[in-house]
Amino acid sequence: MNVQIACPDCTTTIELNPTKLIQGNRFTCSNCKLVVSLAEESRSVVEETLTEFQKIQTQKARQNALT
């Protein structure tokens, strides 16, 4: 699942994979070459948040299937 974020420097869209970001991968803005990554100490918090978000998406999809 890729997501798009605005580059913090130039606002160009950067497409990244949150799972790979958590694993330590870095993503580079195609316009200004700014590198986006997570600090080691932030990875667990982001991973927990992503897991909870995915649970909510699954619940929502199940609810929609029932209606």
Image (cartoon, grey):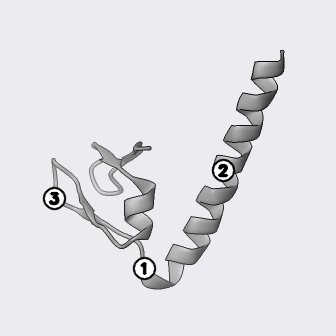
Residue tagged 1: 39
Residues at marks 2 and 1, CA–CA distance in whole angstroms: 20 Å
Can you say whether 60 is above or below 37 in the image? above
Residue tagged 2: 53
Labels in figure, total: 3
Can you say whether 32 is above or below 59 in the image? below
Q: Residue at x 83, y 20 (%)?
A: 66
Residue tagged 3: 33
Local secondary structure at mark 2: helix
Q: Residue at x 39, y 71 (%)?
A: 23
Q: Residue at x 22, y 62 (%)?
A: 34
Mark sitting earlier along the chain (3/1): 3
Q: Is residue 53 left or right of residue 47?
A: right
The amino acid beneath tag 3 is Lys
Q: Residue 61 location, x and y as percent?
A: 71, 30
Front of the two marks 3 and 2: 2
Q: Quadrant of the C terminus?
A: top right
Can you say whether 10 is above or below 58 in the image? below
